Every structure is written in C-alpha cells, then in structure tokens.
Amino acid sequence: MFTLSQLHDYAELCILMRMLCASTSHLLSLAGLAPADLGGMLDTAADLKADRALHDRALGGRAVLMHFTKPSTRTRLSFEAAIARLGGHPVFASADQLQLGRGEPIRDTARVISRYAAAIVVRTHAHADVEEFARWSSVPVINALTDTHHPCQALADLLTVRERFGALAGLEVAYVGDGNNVAHSLIEACALAGMHVRVACPEGYRPLPAVAEAAVAVALRTGGSVTITGDPVAAVTGACAVYTDVFVSMGEDDRRAQKLADLALYRVDDALMALARPDAVFLHCLPAHRGEEVTESVLEGPQSAVFDQAENRLHTAAAVLLRLAAS
Ligand code: CP
Ligand code: NVA
C-alpha cells in the first residue's frame, strides 16, 4: 500500500524519468544551453539570413502551433514568417480559441497538439506553464516570452551585437532599467558567450538572484562576468551595447505609476549613451515607450540598432525551429 504522498512522489518521479528519457529538446530558457549550442544557433541564424532559400523545405509542410496569451508583434510575426520561410505552416490559437481557455489542462492540450504539429511556440505569464507544456509535449516547446524569460529575444540580441562587433567573447554589454524577463535572458546569453554583462537596476527591480547566480557560475567557465549594480553610469561606461526594456511589462499595468517613479533615473538618454564606447549601439527589444525607459533622440539616433535587432528575430526564430523541429 502507498500513501497519497508516496503516490504523488512516484508520479513526479515518472514524469522526471519521462523528461530525462525523452529525446525532445525544448527552448524554455537559455540556462540549460552549452556555449556551443548558443554559438551554433547564432551561426545557423547568420546562414539563414545570408541565403534566404537555405533550408526552405525543412519543415516539410508541417504545422507549428503558436499559442499566445499576451499580445505580440515581433515574436508572433517573426515566428509565423520563419515557419513559412522553412516550408512549414503556422497555426495561431489564443487561449479563448482553445479549450485550454475553458479549463482543459495543459497536459492534455500539449499531448493533443503534439499529434498535429512539429513544434509548439508559447507566450504566457507563468514560466511554470511553458515547463508544463514541455513536460507533456512530445514535440519541441519554444518559449516565446514568459514573465521571467525571453530566450528568443536574447538570441536576436546577440546576433545583432555579433554582426556589429564580431566575436562576442570579451565584449561589454550594459542593461539599464527593470531586471525583468528580457534582462534575465540577456544575462544568460551573455554569460554563455563569455561576455561581460553589467546590469543597473534600482533596489527592488534587480534580476532574480537564482538567474544571476546561475549566470555567474556559467560566466566563470566561459571567461565572462555578470555584474549587478544600482549605478547606470558604472554599467554603461565603456560598453559596446546599451540595452533597455519597457519599465512596465505586460501584466503589470496596476503597478505602472510606482514603476515609472522608481525607474525614472534609469532612462537611457544621450548623456548616458555618451559614456559608452563611441561606436556603441543602443538596443531595445521593442515595443519602446519613448520618454519612459529611453528618449526619442536615443531611440531614433544614429547608434540605435533596434530595427536590425527586430529583423534578427526572424532569422533567429528560423534557426531555433530548424535546430529543434526540422526532421
Ligand atoms: N520584442 C518582442 O518580443 O516584441 P513583441 O512583444 O512584439 O513580440
Ligand atoms: N518585458 C516586456 C517585454 C516585451 C517584449 C514584457 O514582458 O512585456
């Protein structure tokens, strides 16, 4: 006879064994990647960008399911274009179009979609929900943004920096503002690439300690470093890229006034940009809120690389799909 708690432990063990034995690779965050995986992904993206016909039948007409519970311009459209680019068929379904919105569990939804699609691309709030998709899906699950991670964005960010400055190892990158999902994935990506990332956030808005500590451990192996500071000047001085993101993320509108007040000194303006290397680029995942996290003059200025960055979402999305979902 088993107790209920033993049965629960046994069920968890079975799930863990399934995950360990499964050959399916997912992209939920960059934390589990090896440096070579990241480099390979960026190389693939660069190849796909250079030759628009390369691998154009890789998905063989198969469907890729896109399930988003938050709005999106770049991620949704770049993935839809990337799926078409690789000869696949994008199918978009918001929560209210799926039985998921009426309470069907993720575990059932994921197993059903796995029978139809080559991959599942998910944007939602709780990171645990994409983990639950991955736990039950037999096809790759790709995180298109959760409240804590945005790995596909960070791939495009690094491709953009690499295009401007060449080899990534040793480059210095500053992130200024809210230590949010975009910051987490950037930190993880920079650590994997052996870069020096300096993140300036006020108290209460720093990246999650678990993310920062894991990235520090990775950076120790790759020759990079991760610095968390309260001082935007210290973060930006000498950097080759200065990055910020919105101060109020999706789902945080009830905290809007407080966040804008707390983060006001972390706006990227011309004076802050002037402390970076003269050839530094300004990066922003977009959408931008001019006058909040960045001034109009920086966003529209000659150092801004934000539209190259946005374009690179397409090429990195195609690289992710090619490496995870093409047979
Ligand atoms: N950068 C980014 O993820 O943009 P969207 O919210 O428009 O997808
Ligand atoms: N931090 C932002 C990123 C949007 C692409 C958000 O989560 O809304």
Image: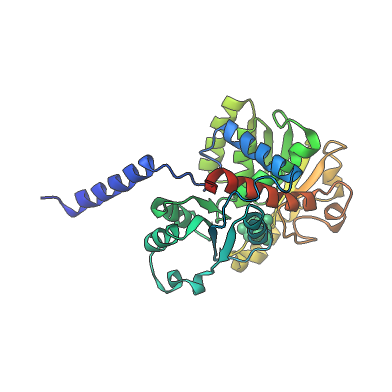
**Quick one: which residue is furthest to the left in this view?**
1
**Depth order, front residue of 327/322:** 327
**Depth order, front residue of 274/160:** 160
* Residue 90 at x, y percent in the picture: 59, 62
* Residue 39 at x, y percent in the picture: 64, 34
**Which color scheme does this rendered protein use?**
rainbow
* Residue 21 at x, y percent in the picture: 36, 40
The answer to whether residue 177 is visible is no
Residue located 64% across and 49% down the image: 318
Q: How many marks?
A: 0
* Residue 173 at x, y percent in the picture: 72, 38
The answer to whether residue 37 is visible is yes
Q: Work out whether 270 lies above or below 288.
A: above
**Depth order, front residue of 253/81:** 81
Q: Work out whether 134 lies above or below 231.
A: below
**Depth order, front residue of 61/269:** 61
Which of the four quarters of the rendered structure image does ligand 1 lie in?
bottom right
Residue located 77% across and 39% down the image: 163
> Could you tell whether 20 is left or right of 94 in the image?
left
Residue located 59% across and 48% down the image: 58
Residue located 54% across and 37% down the image: 33
Q: Work out whether 19 lies above or below 93.
A: above
> Could you tell whether 1 is left or right of 182 in the image?
left
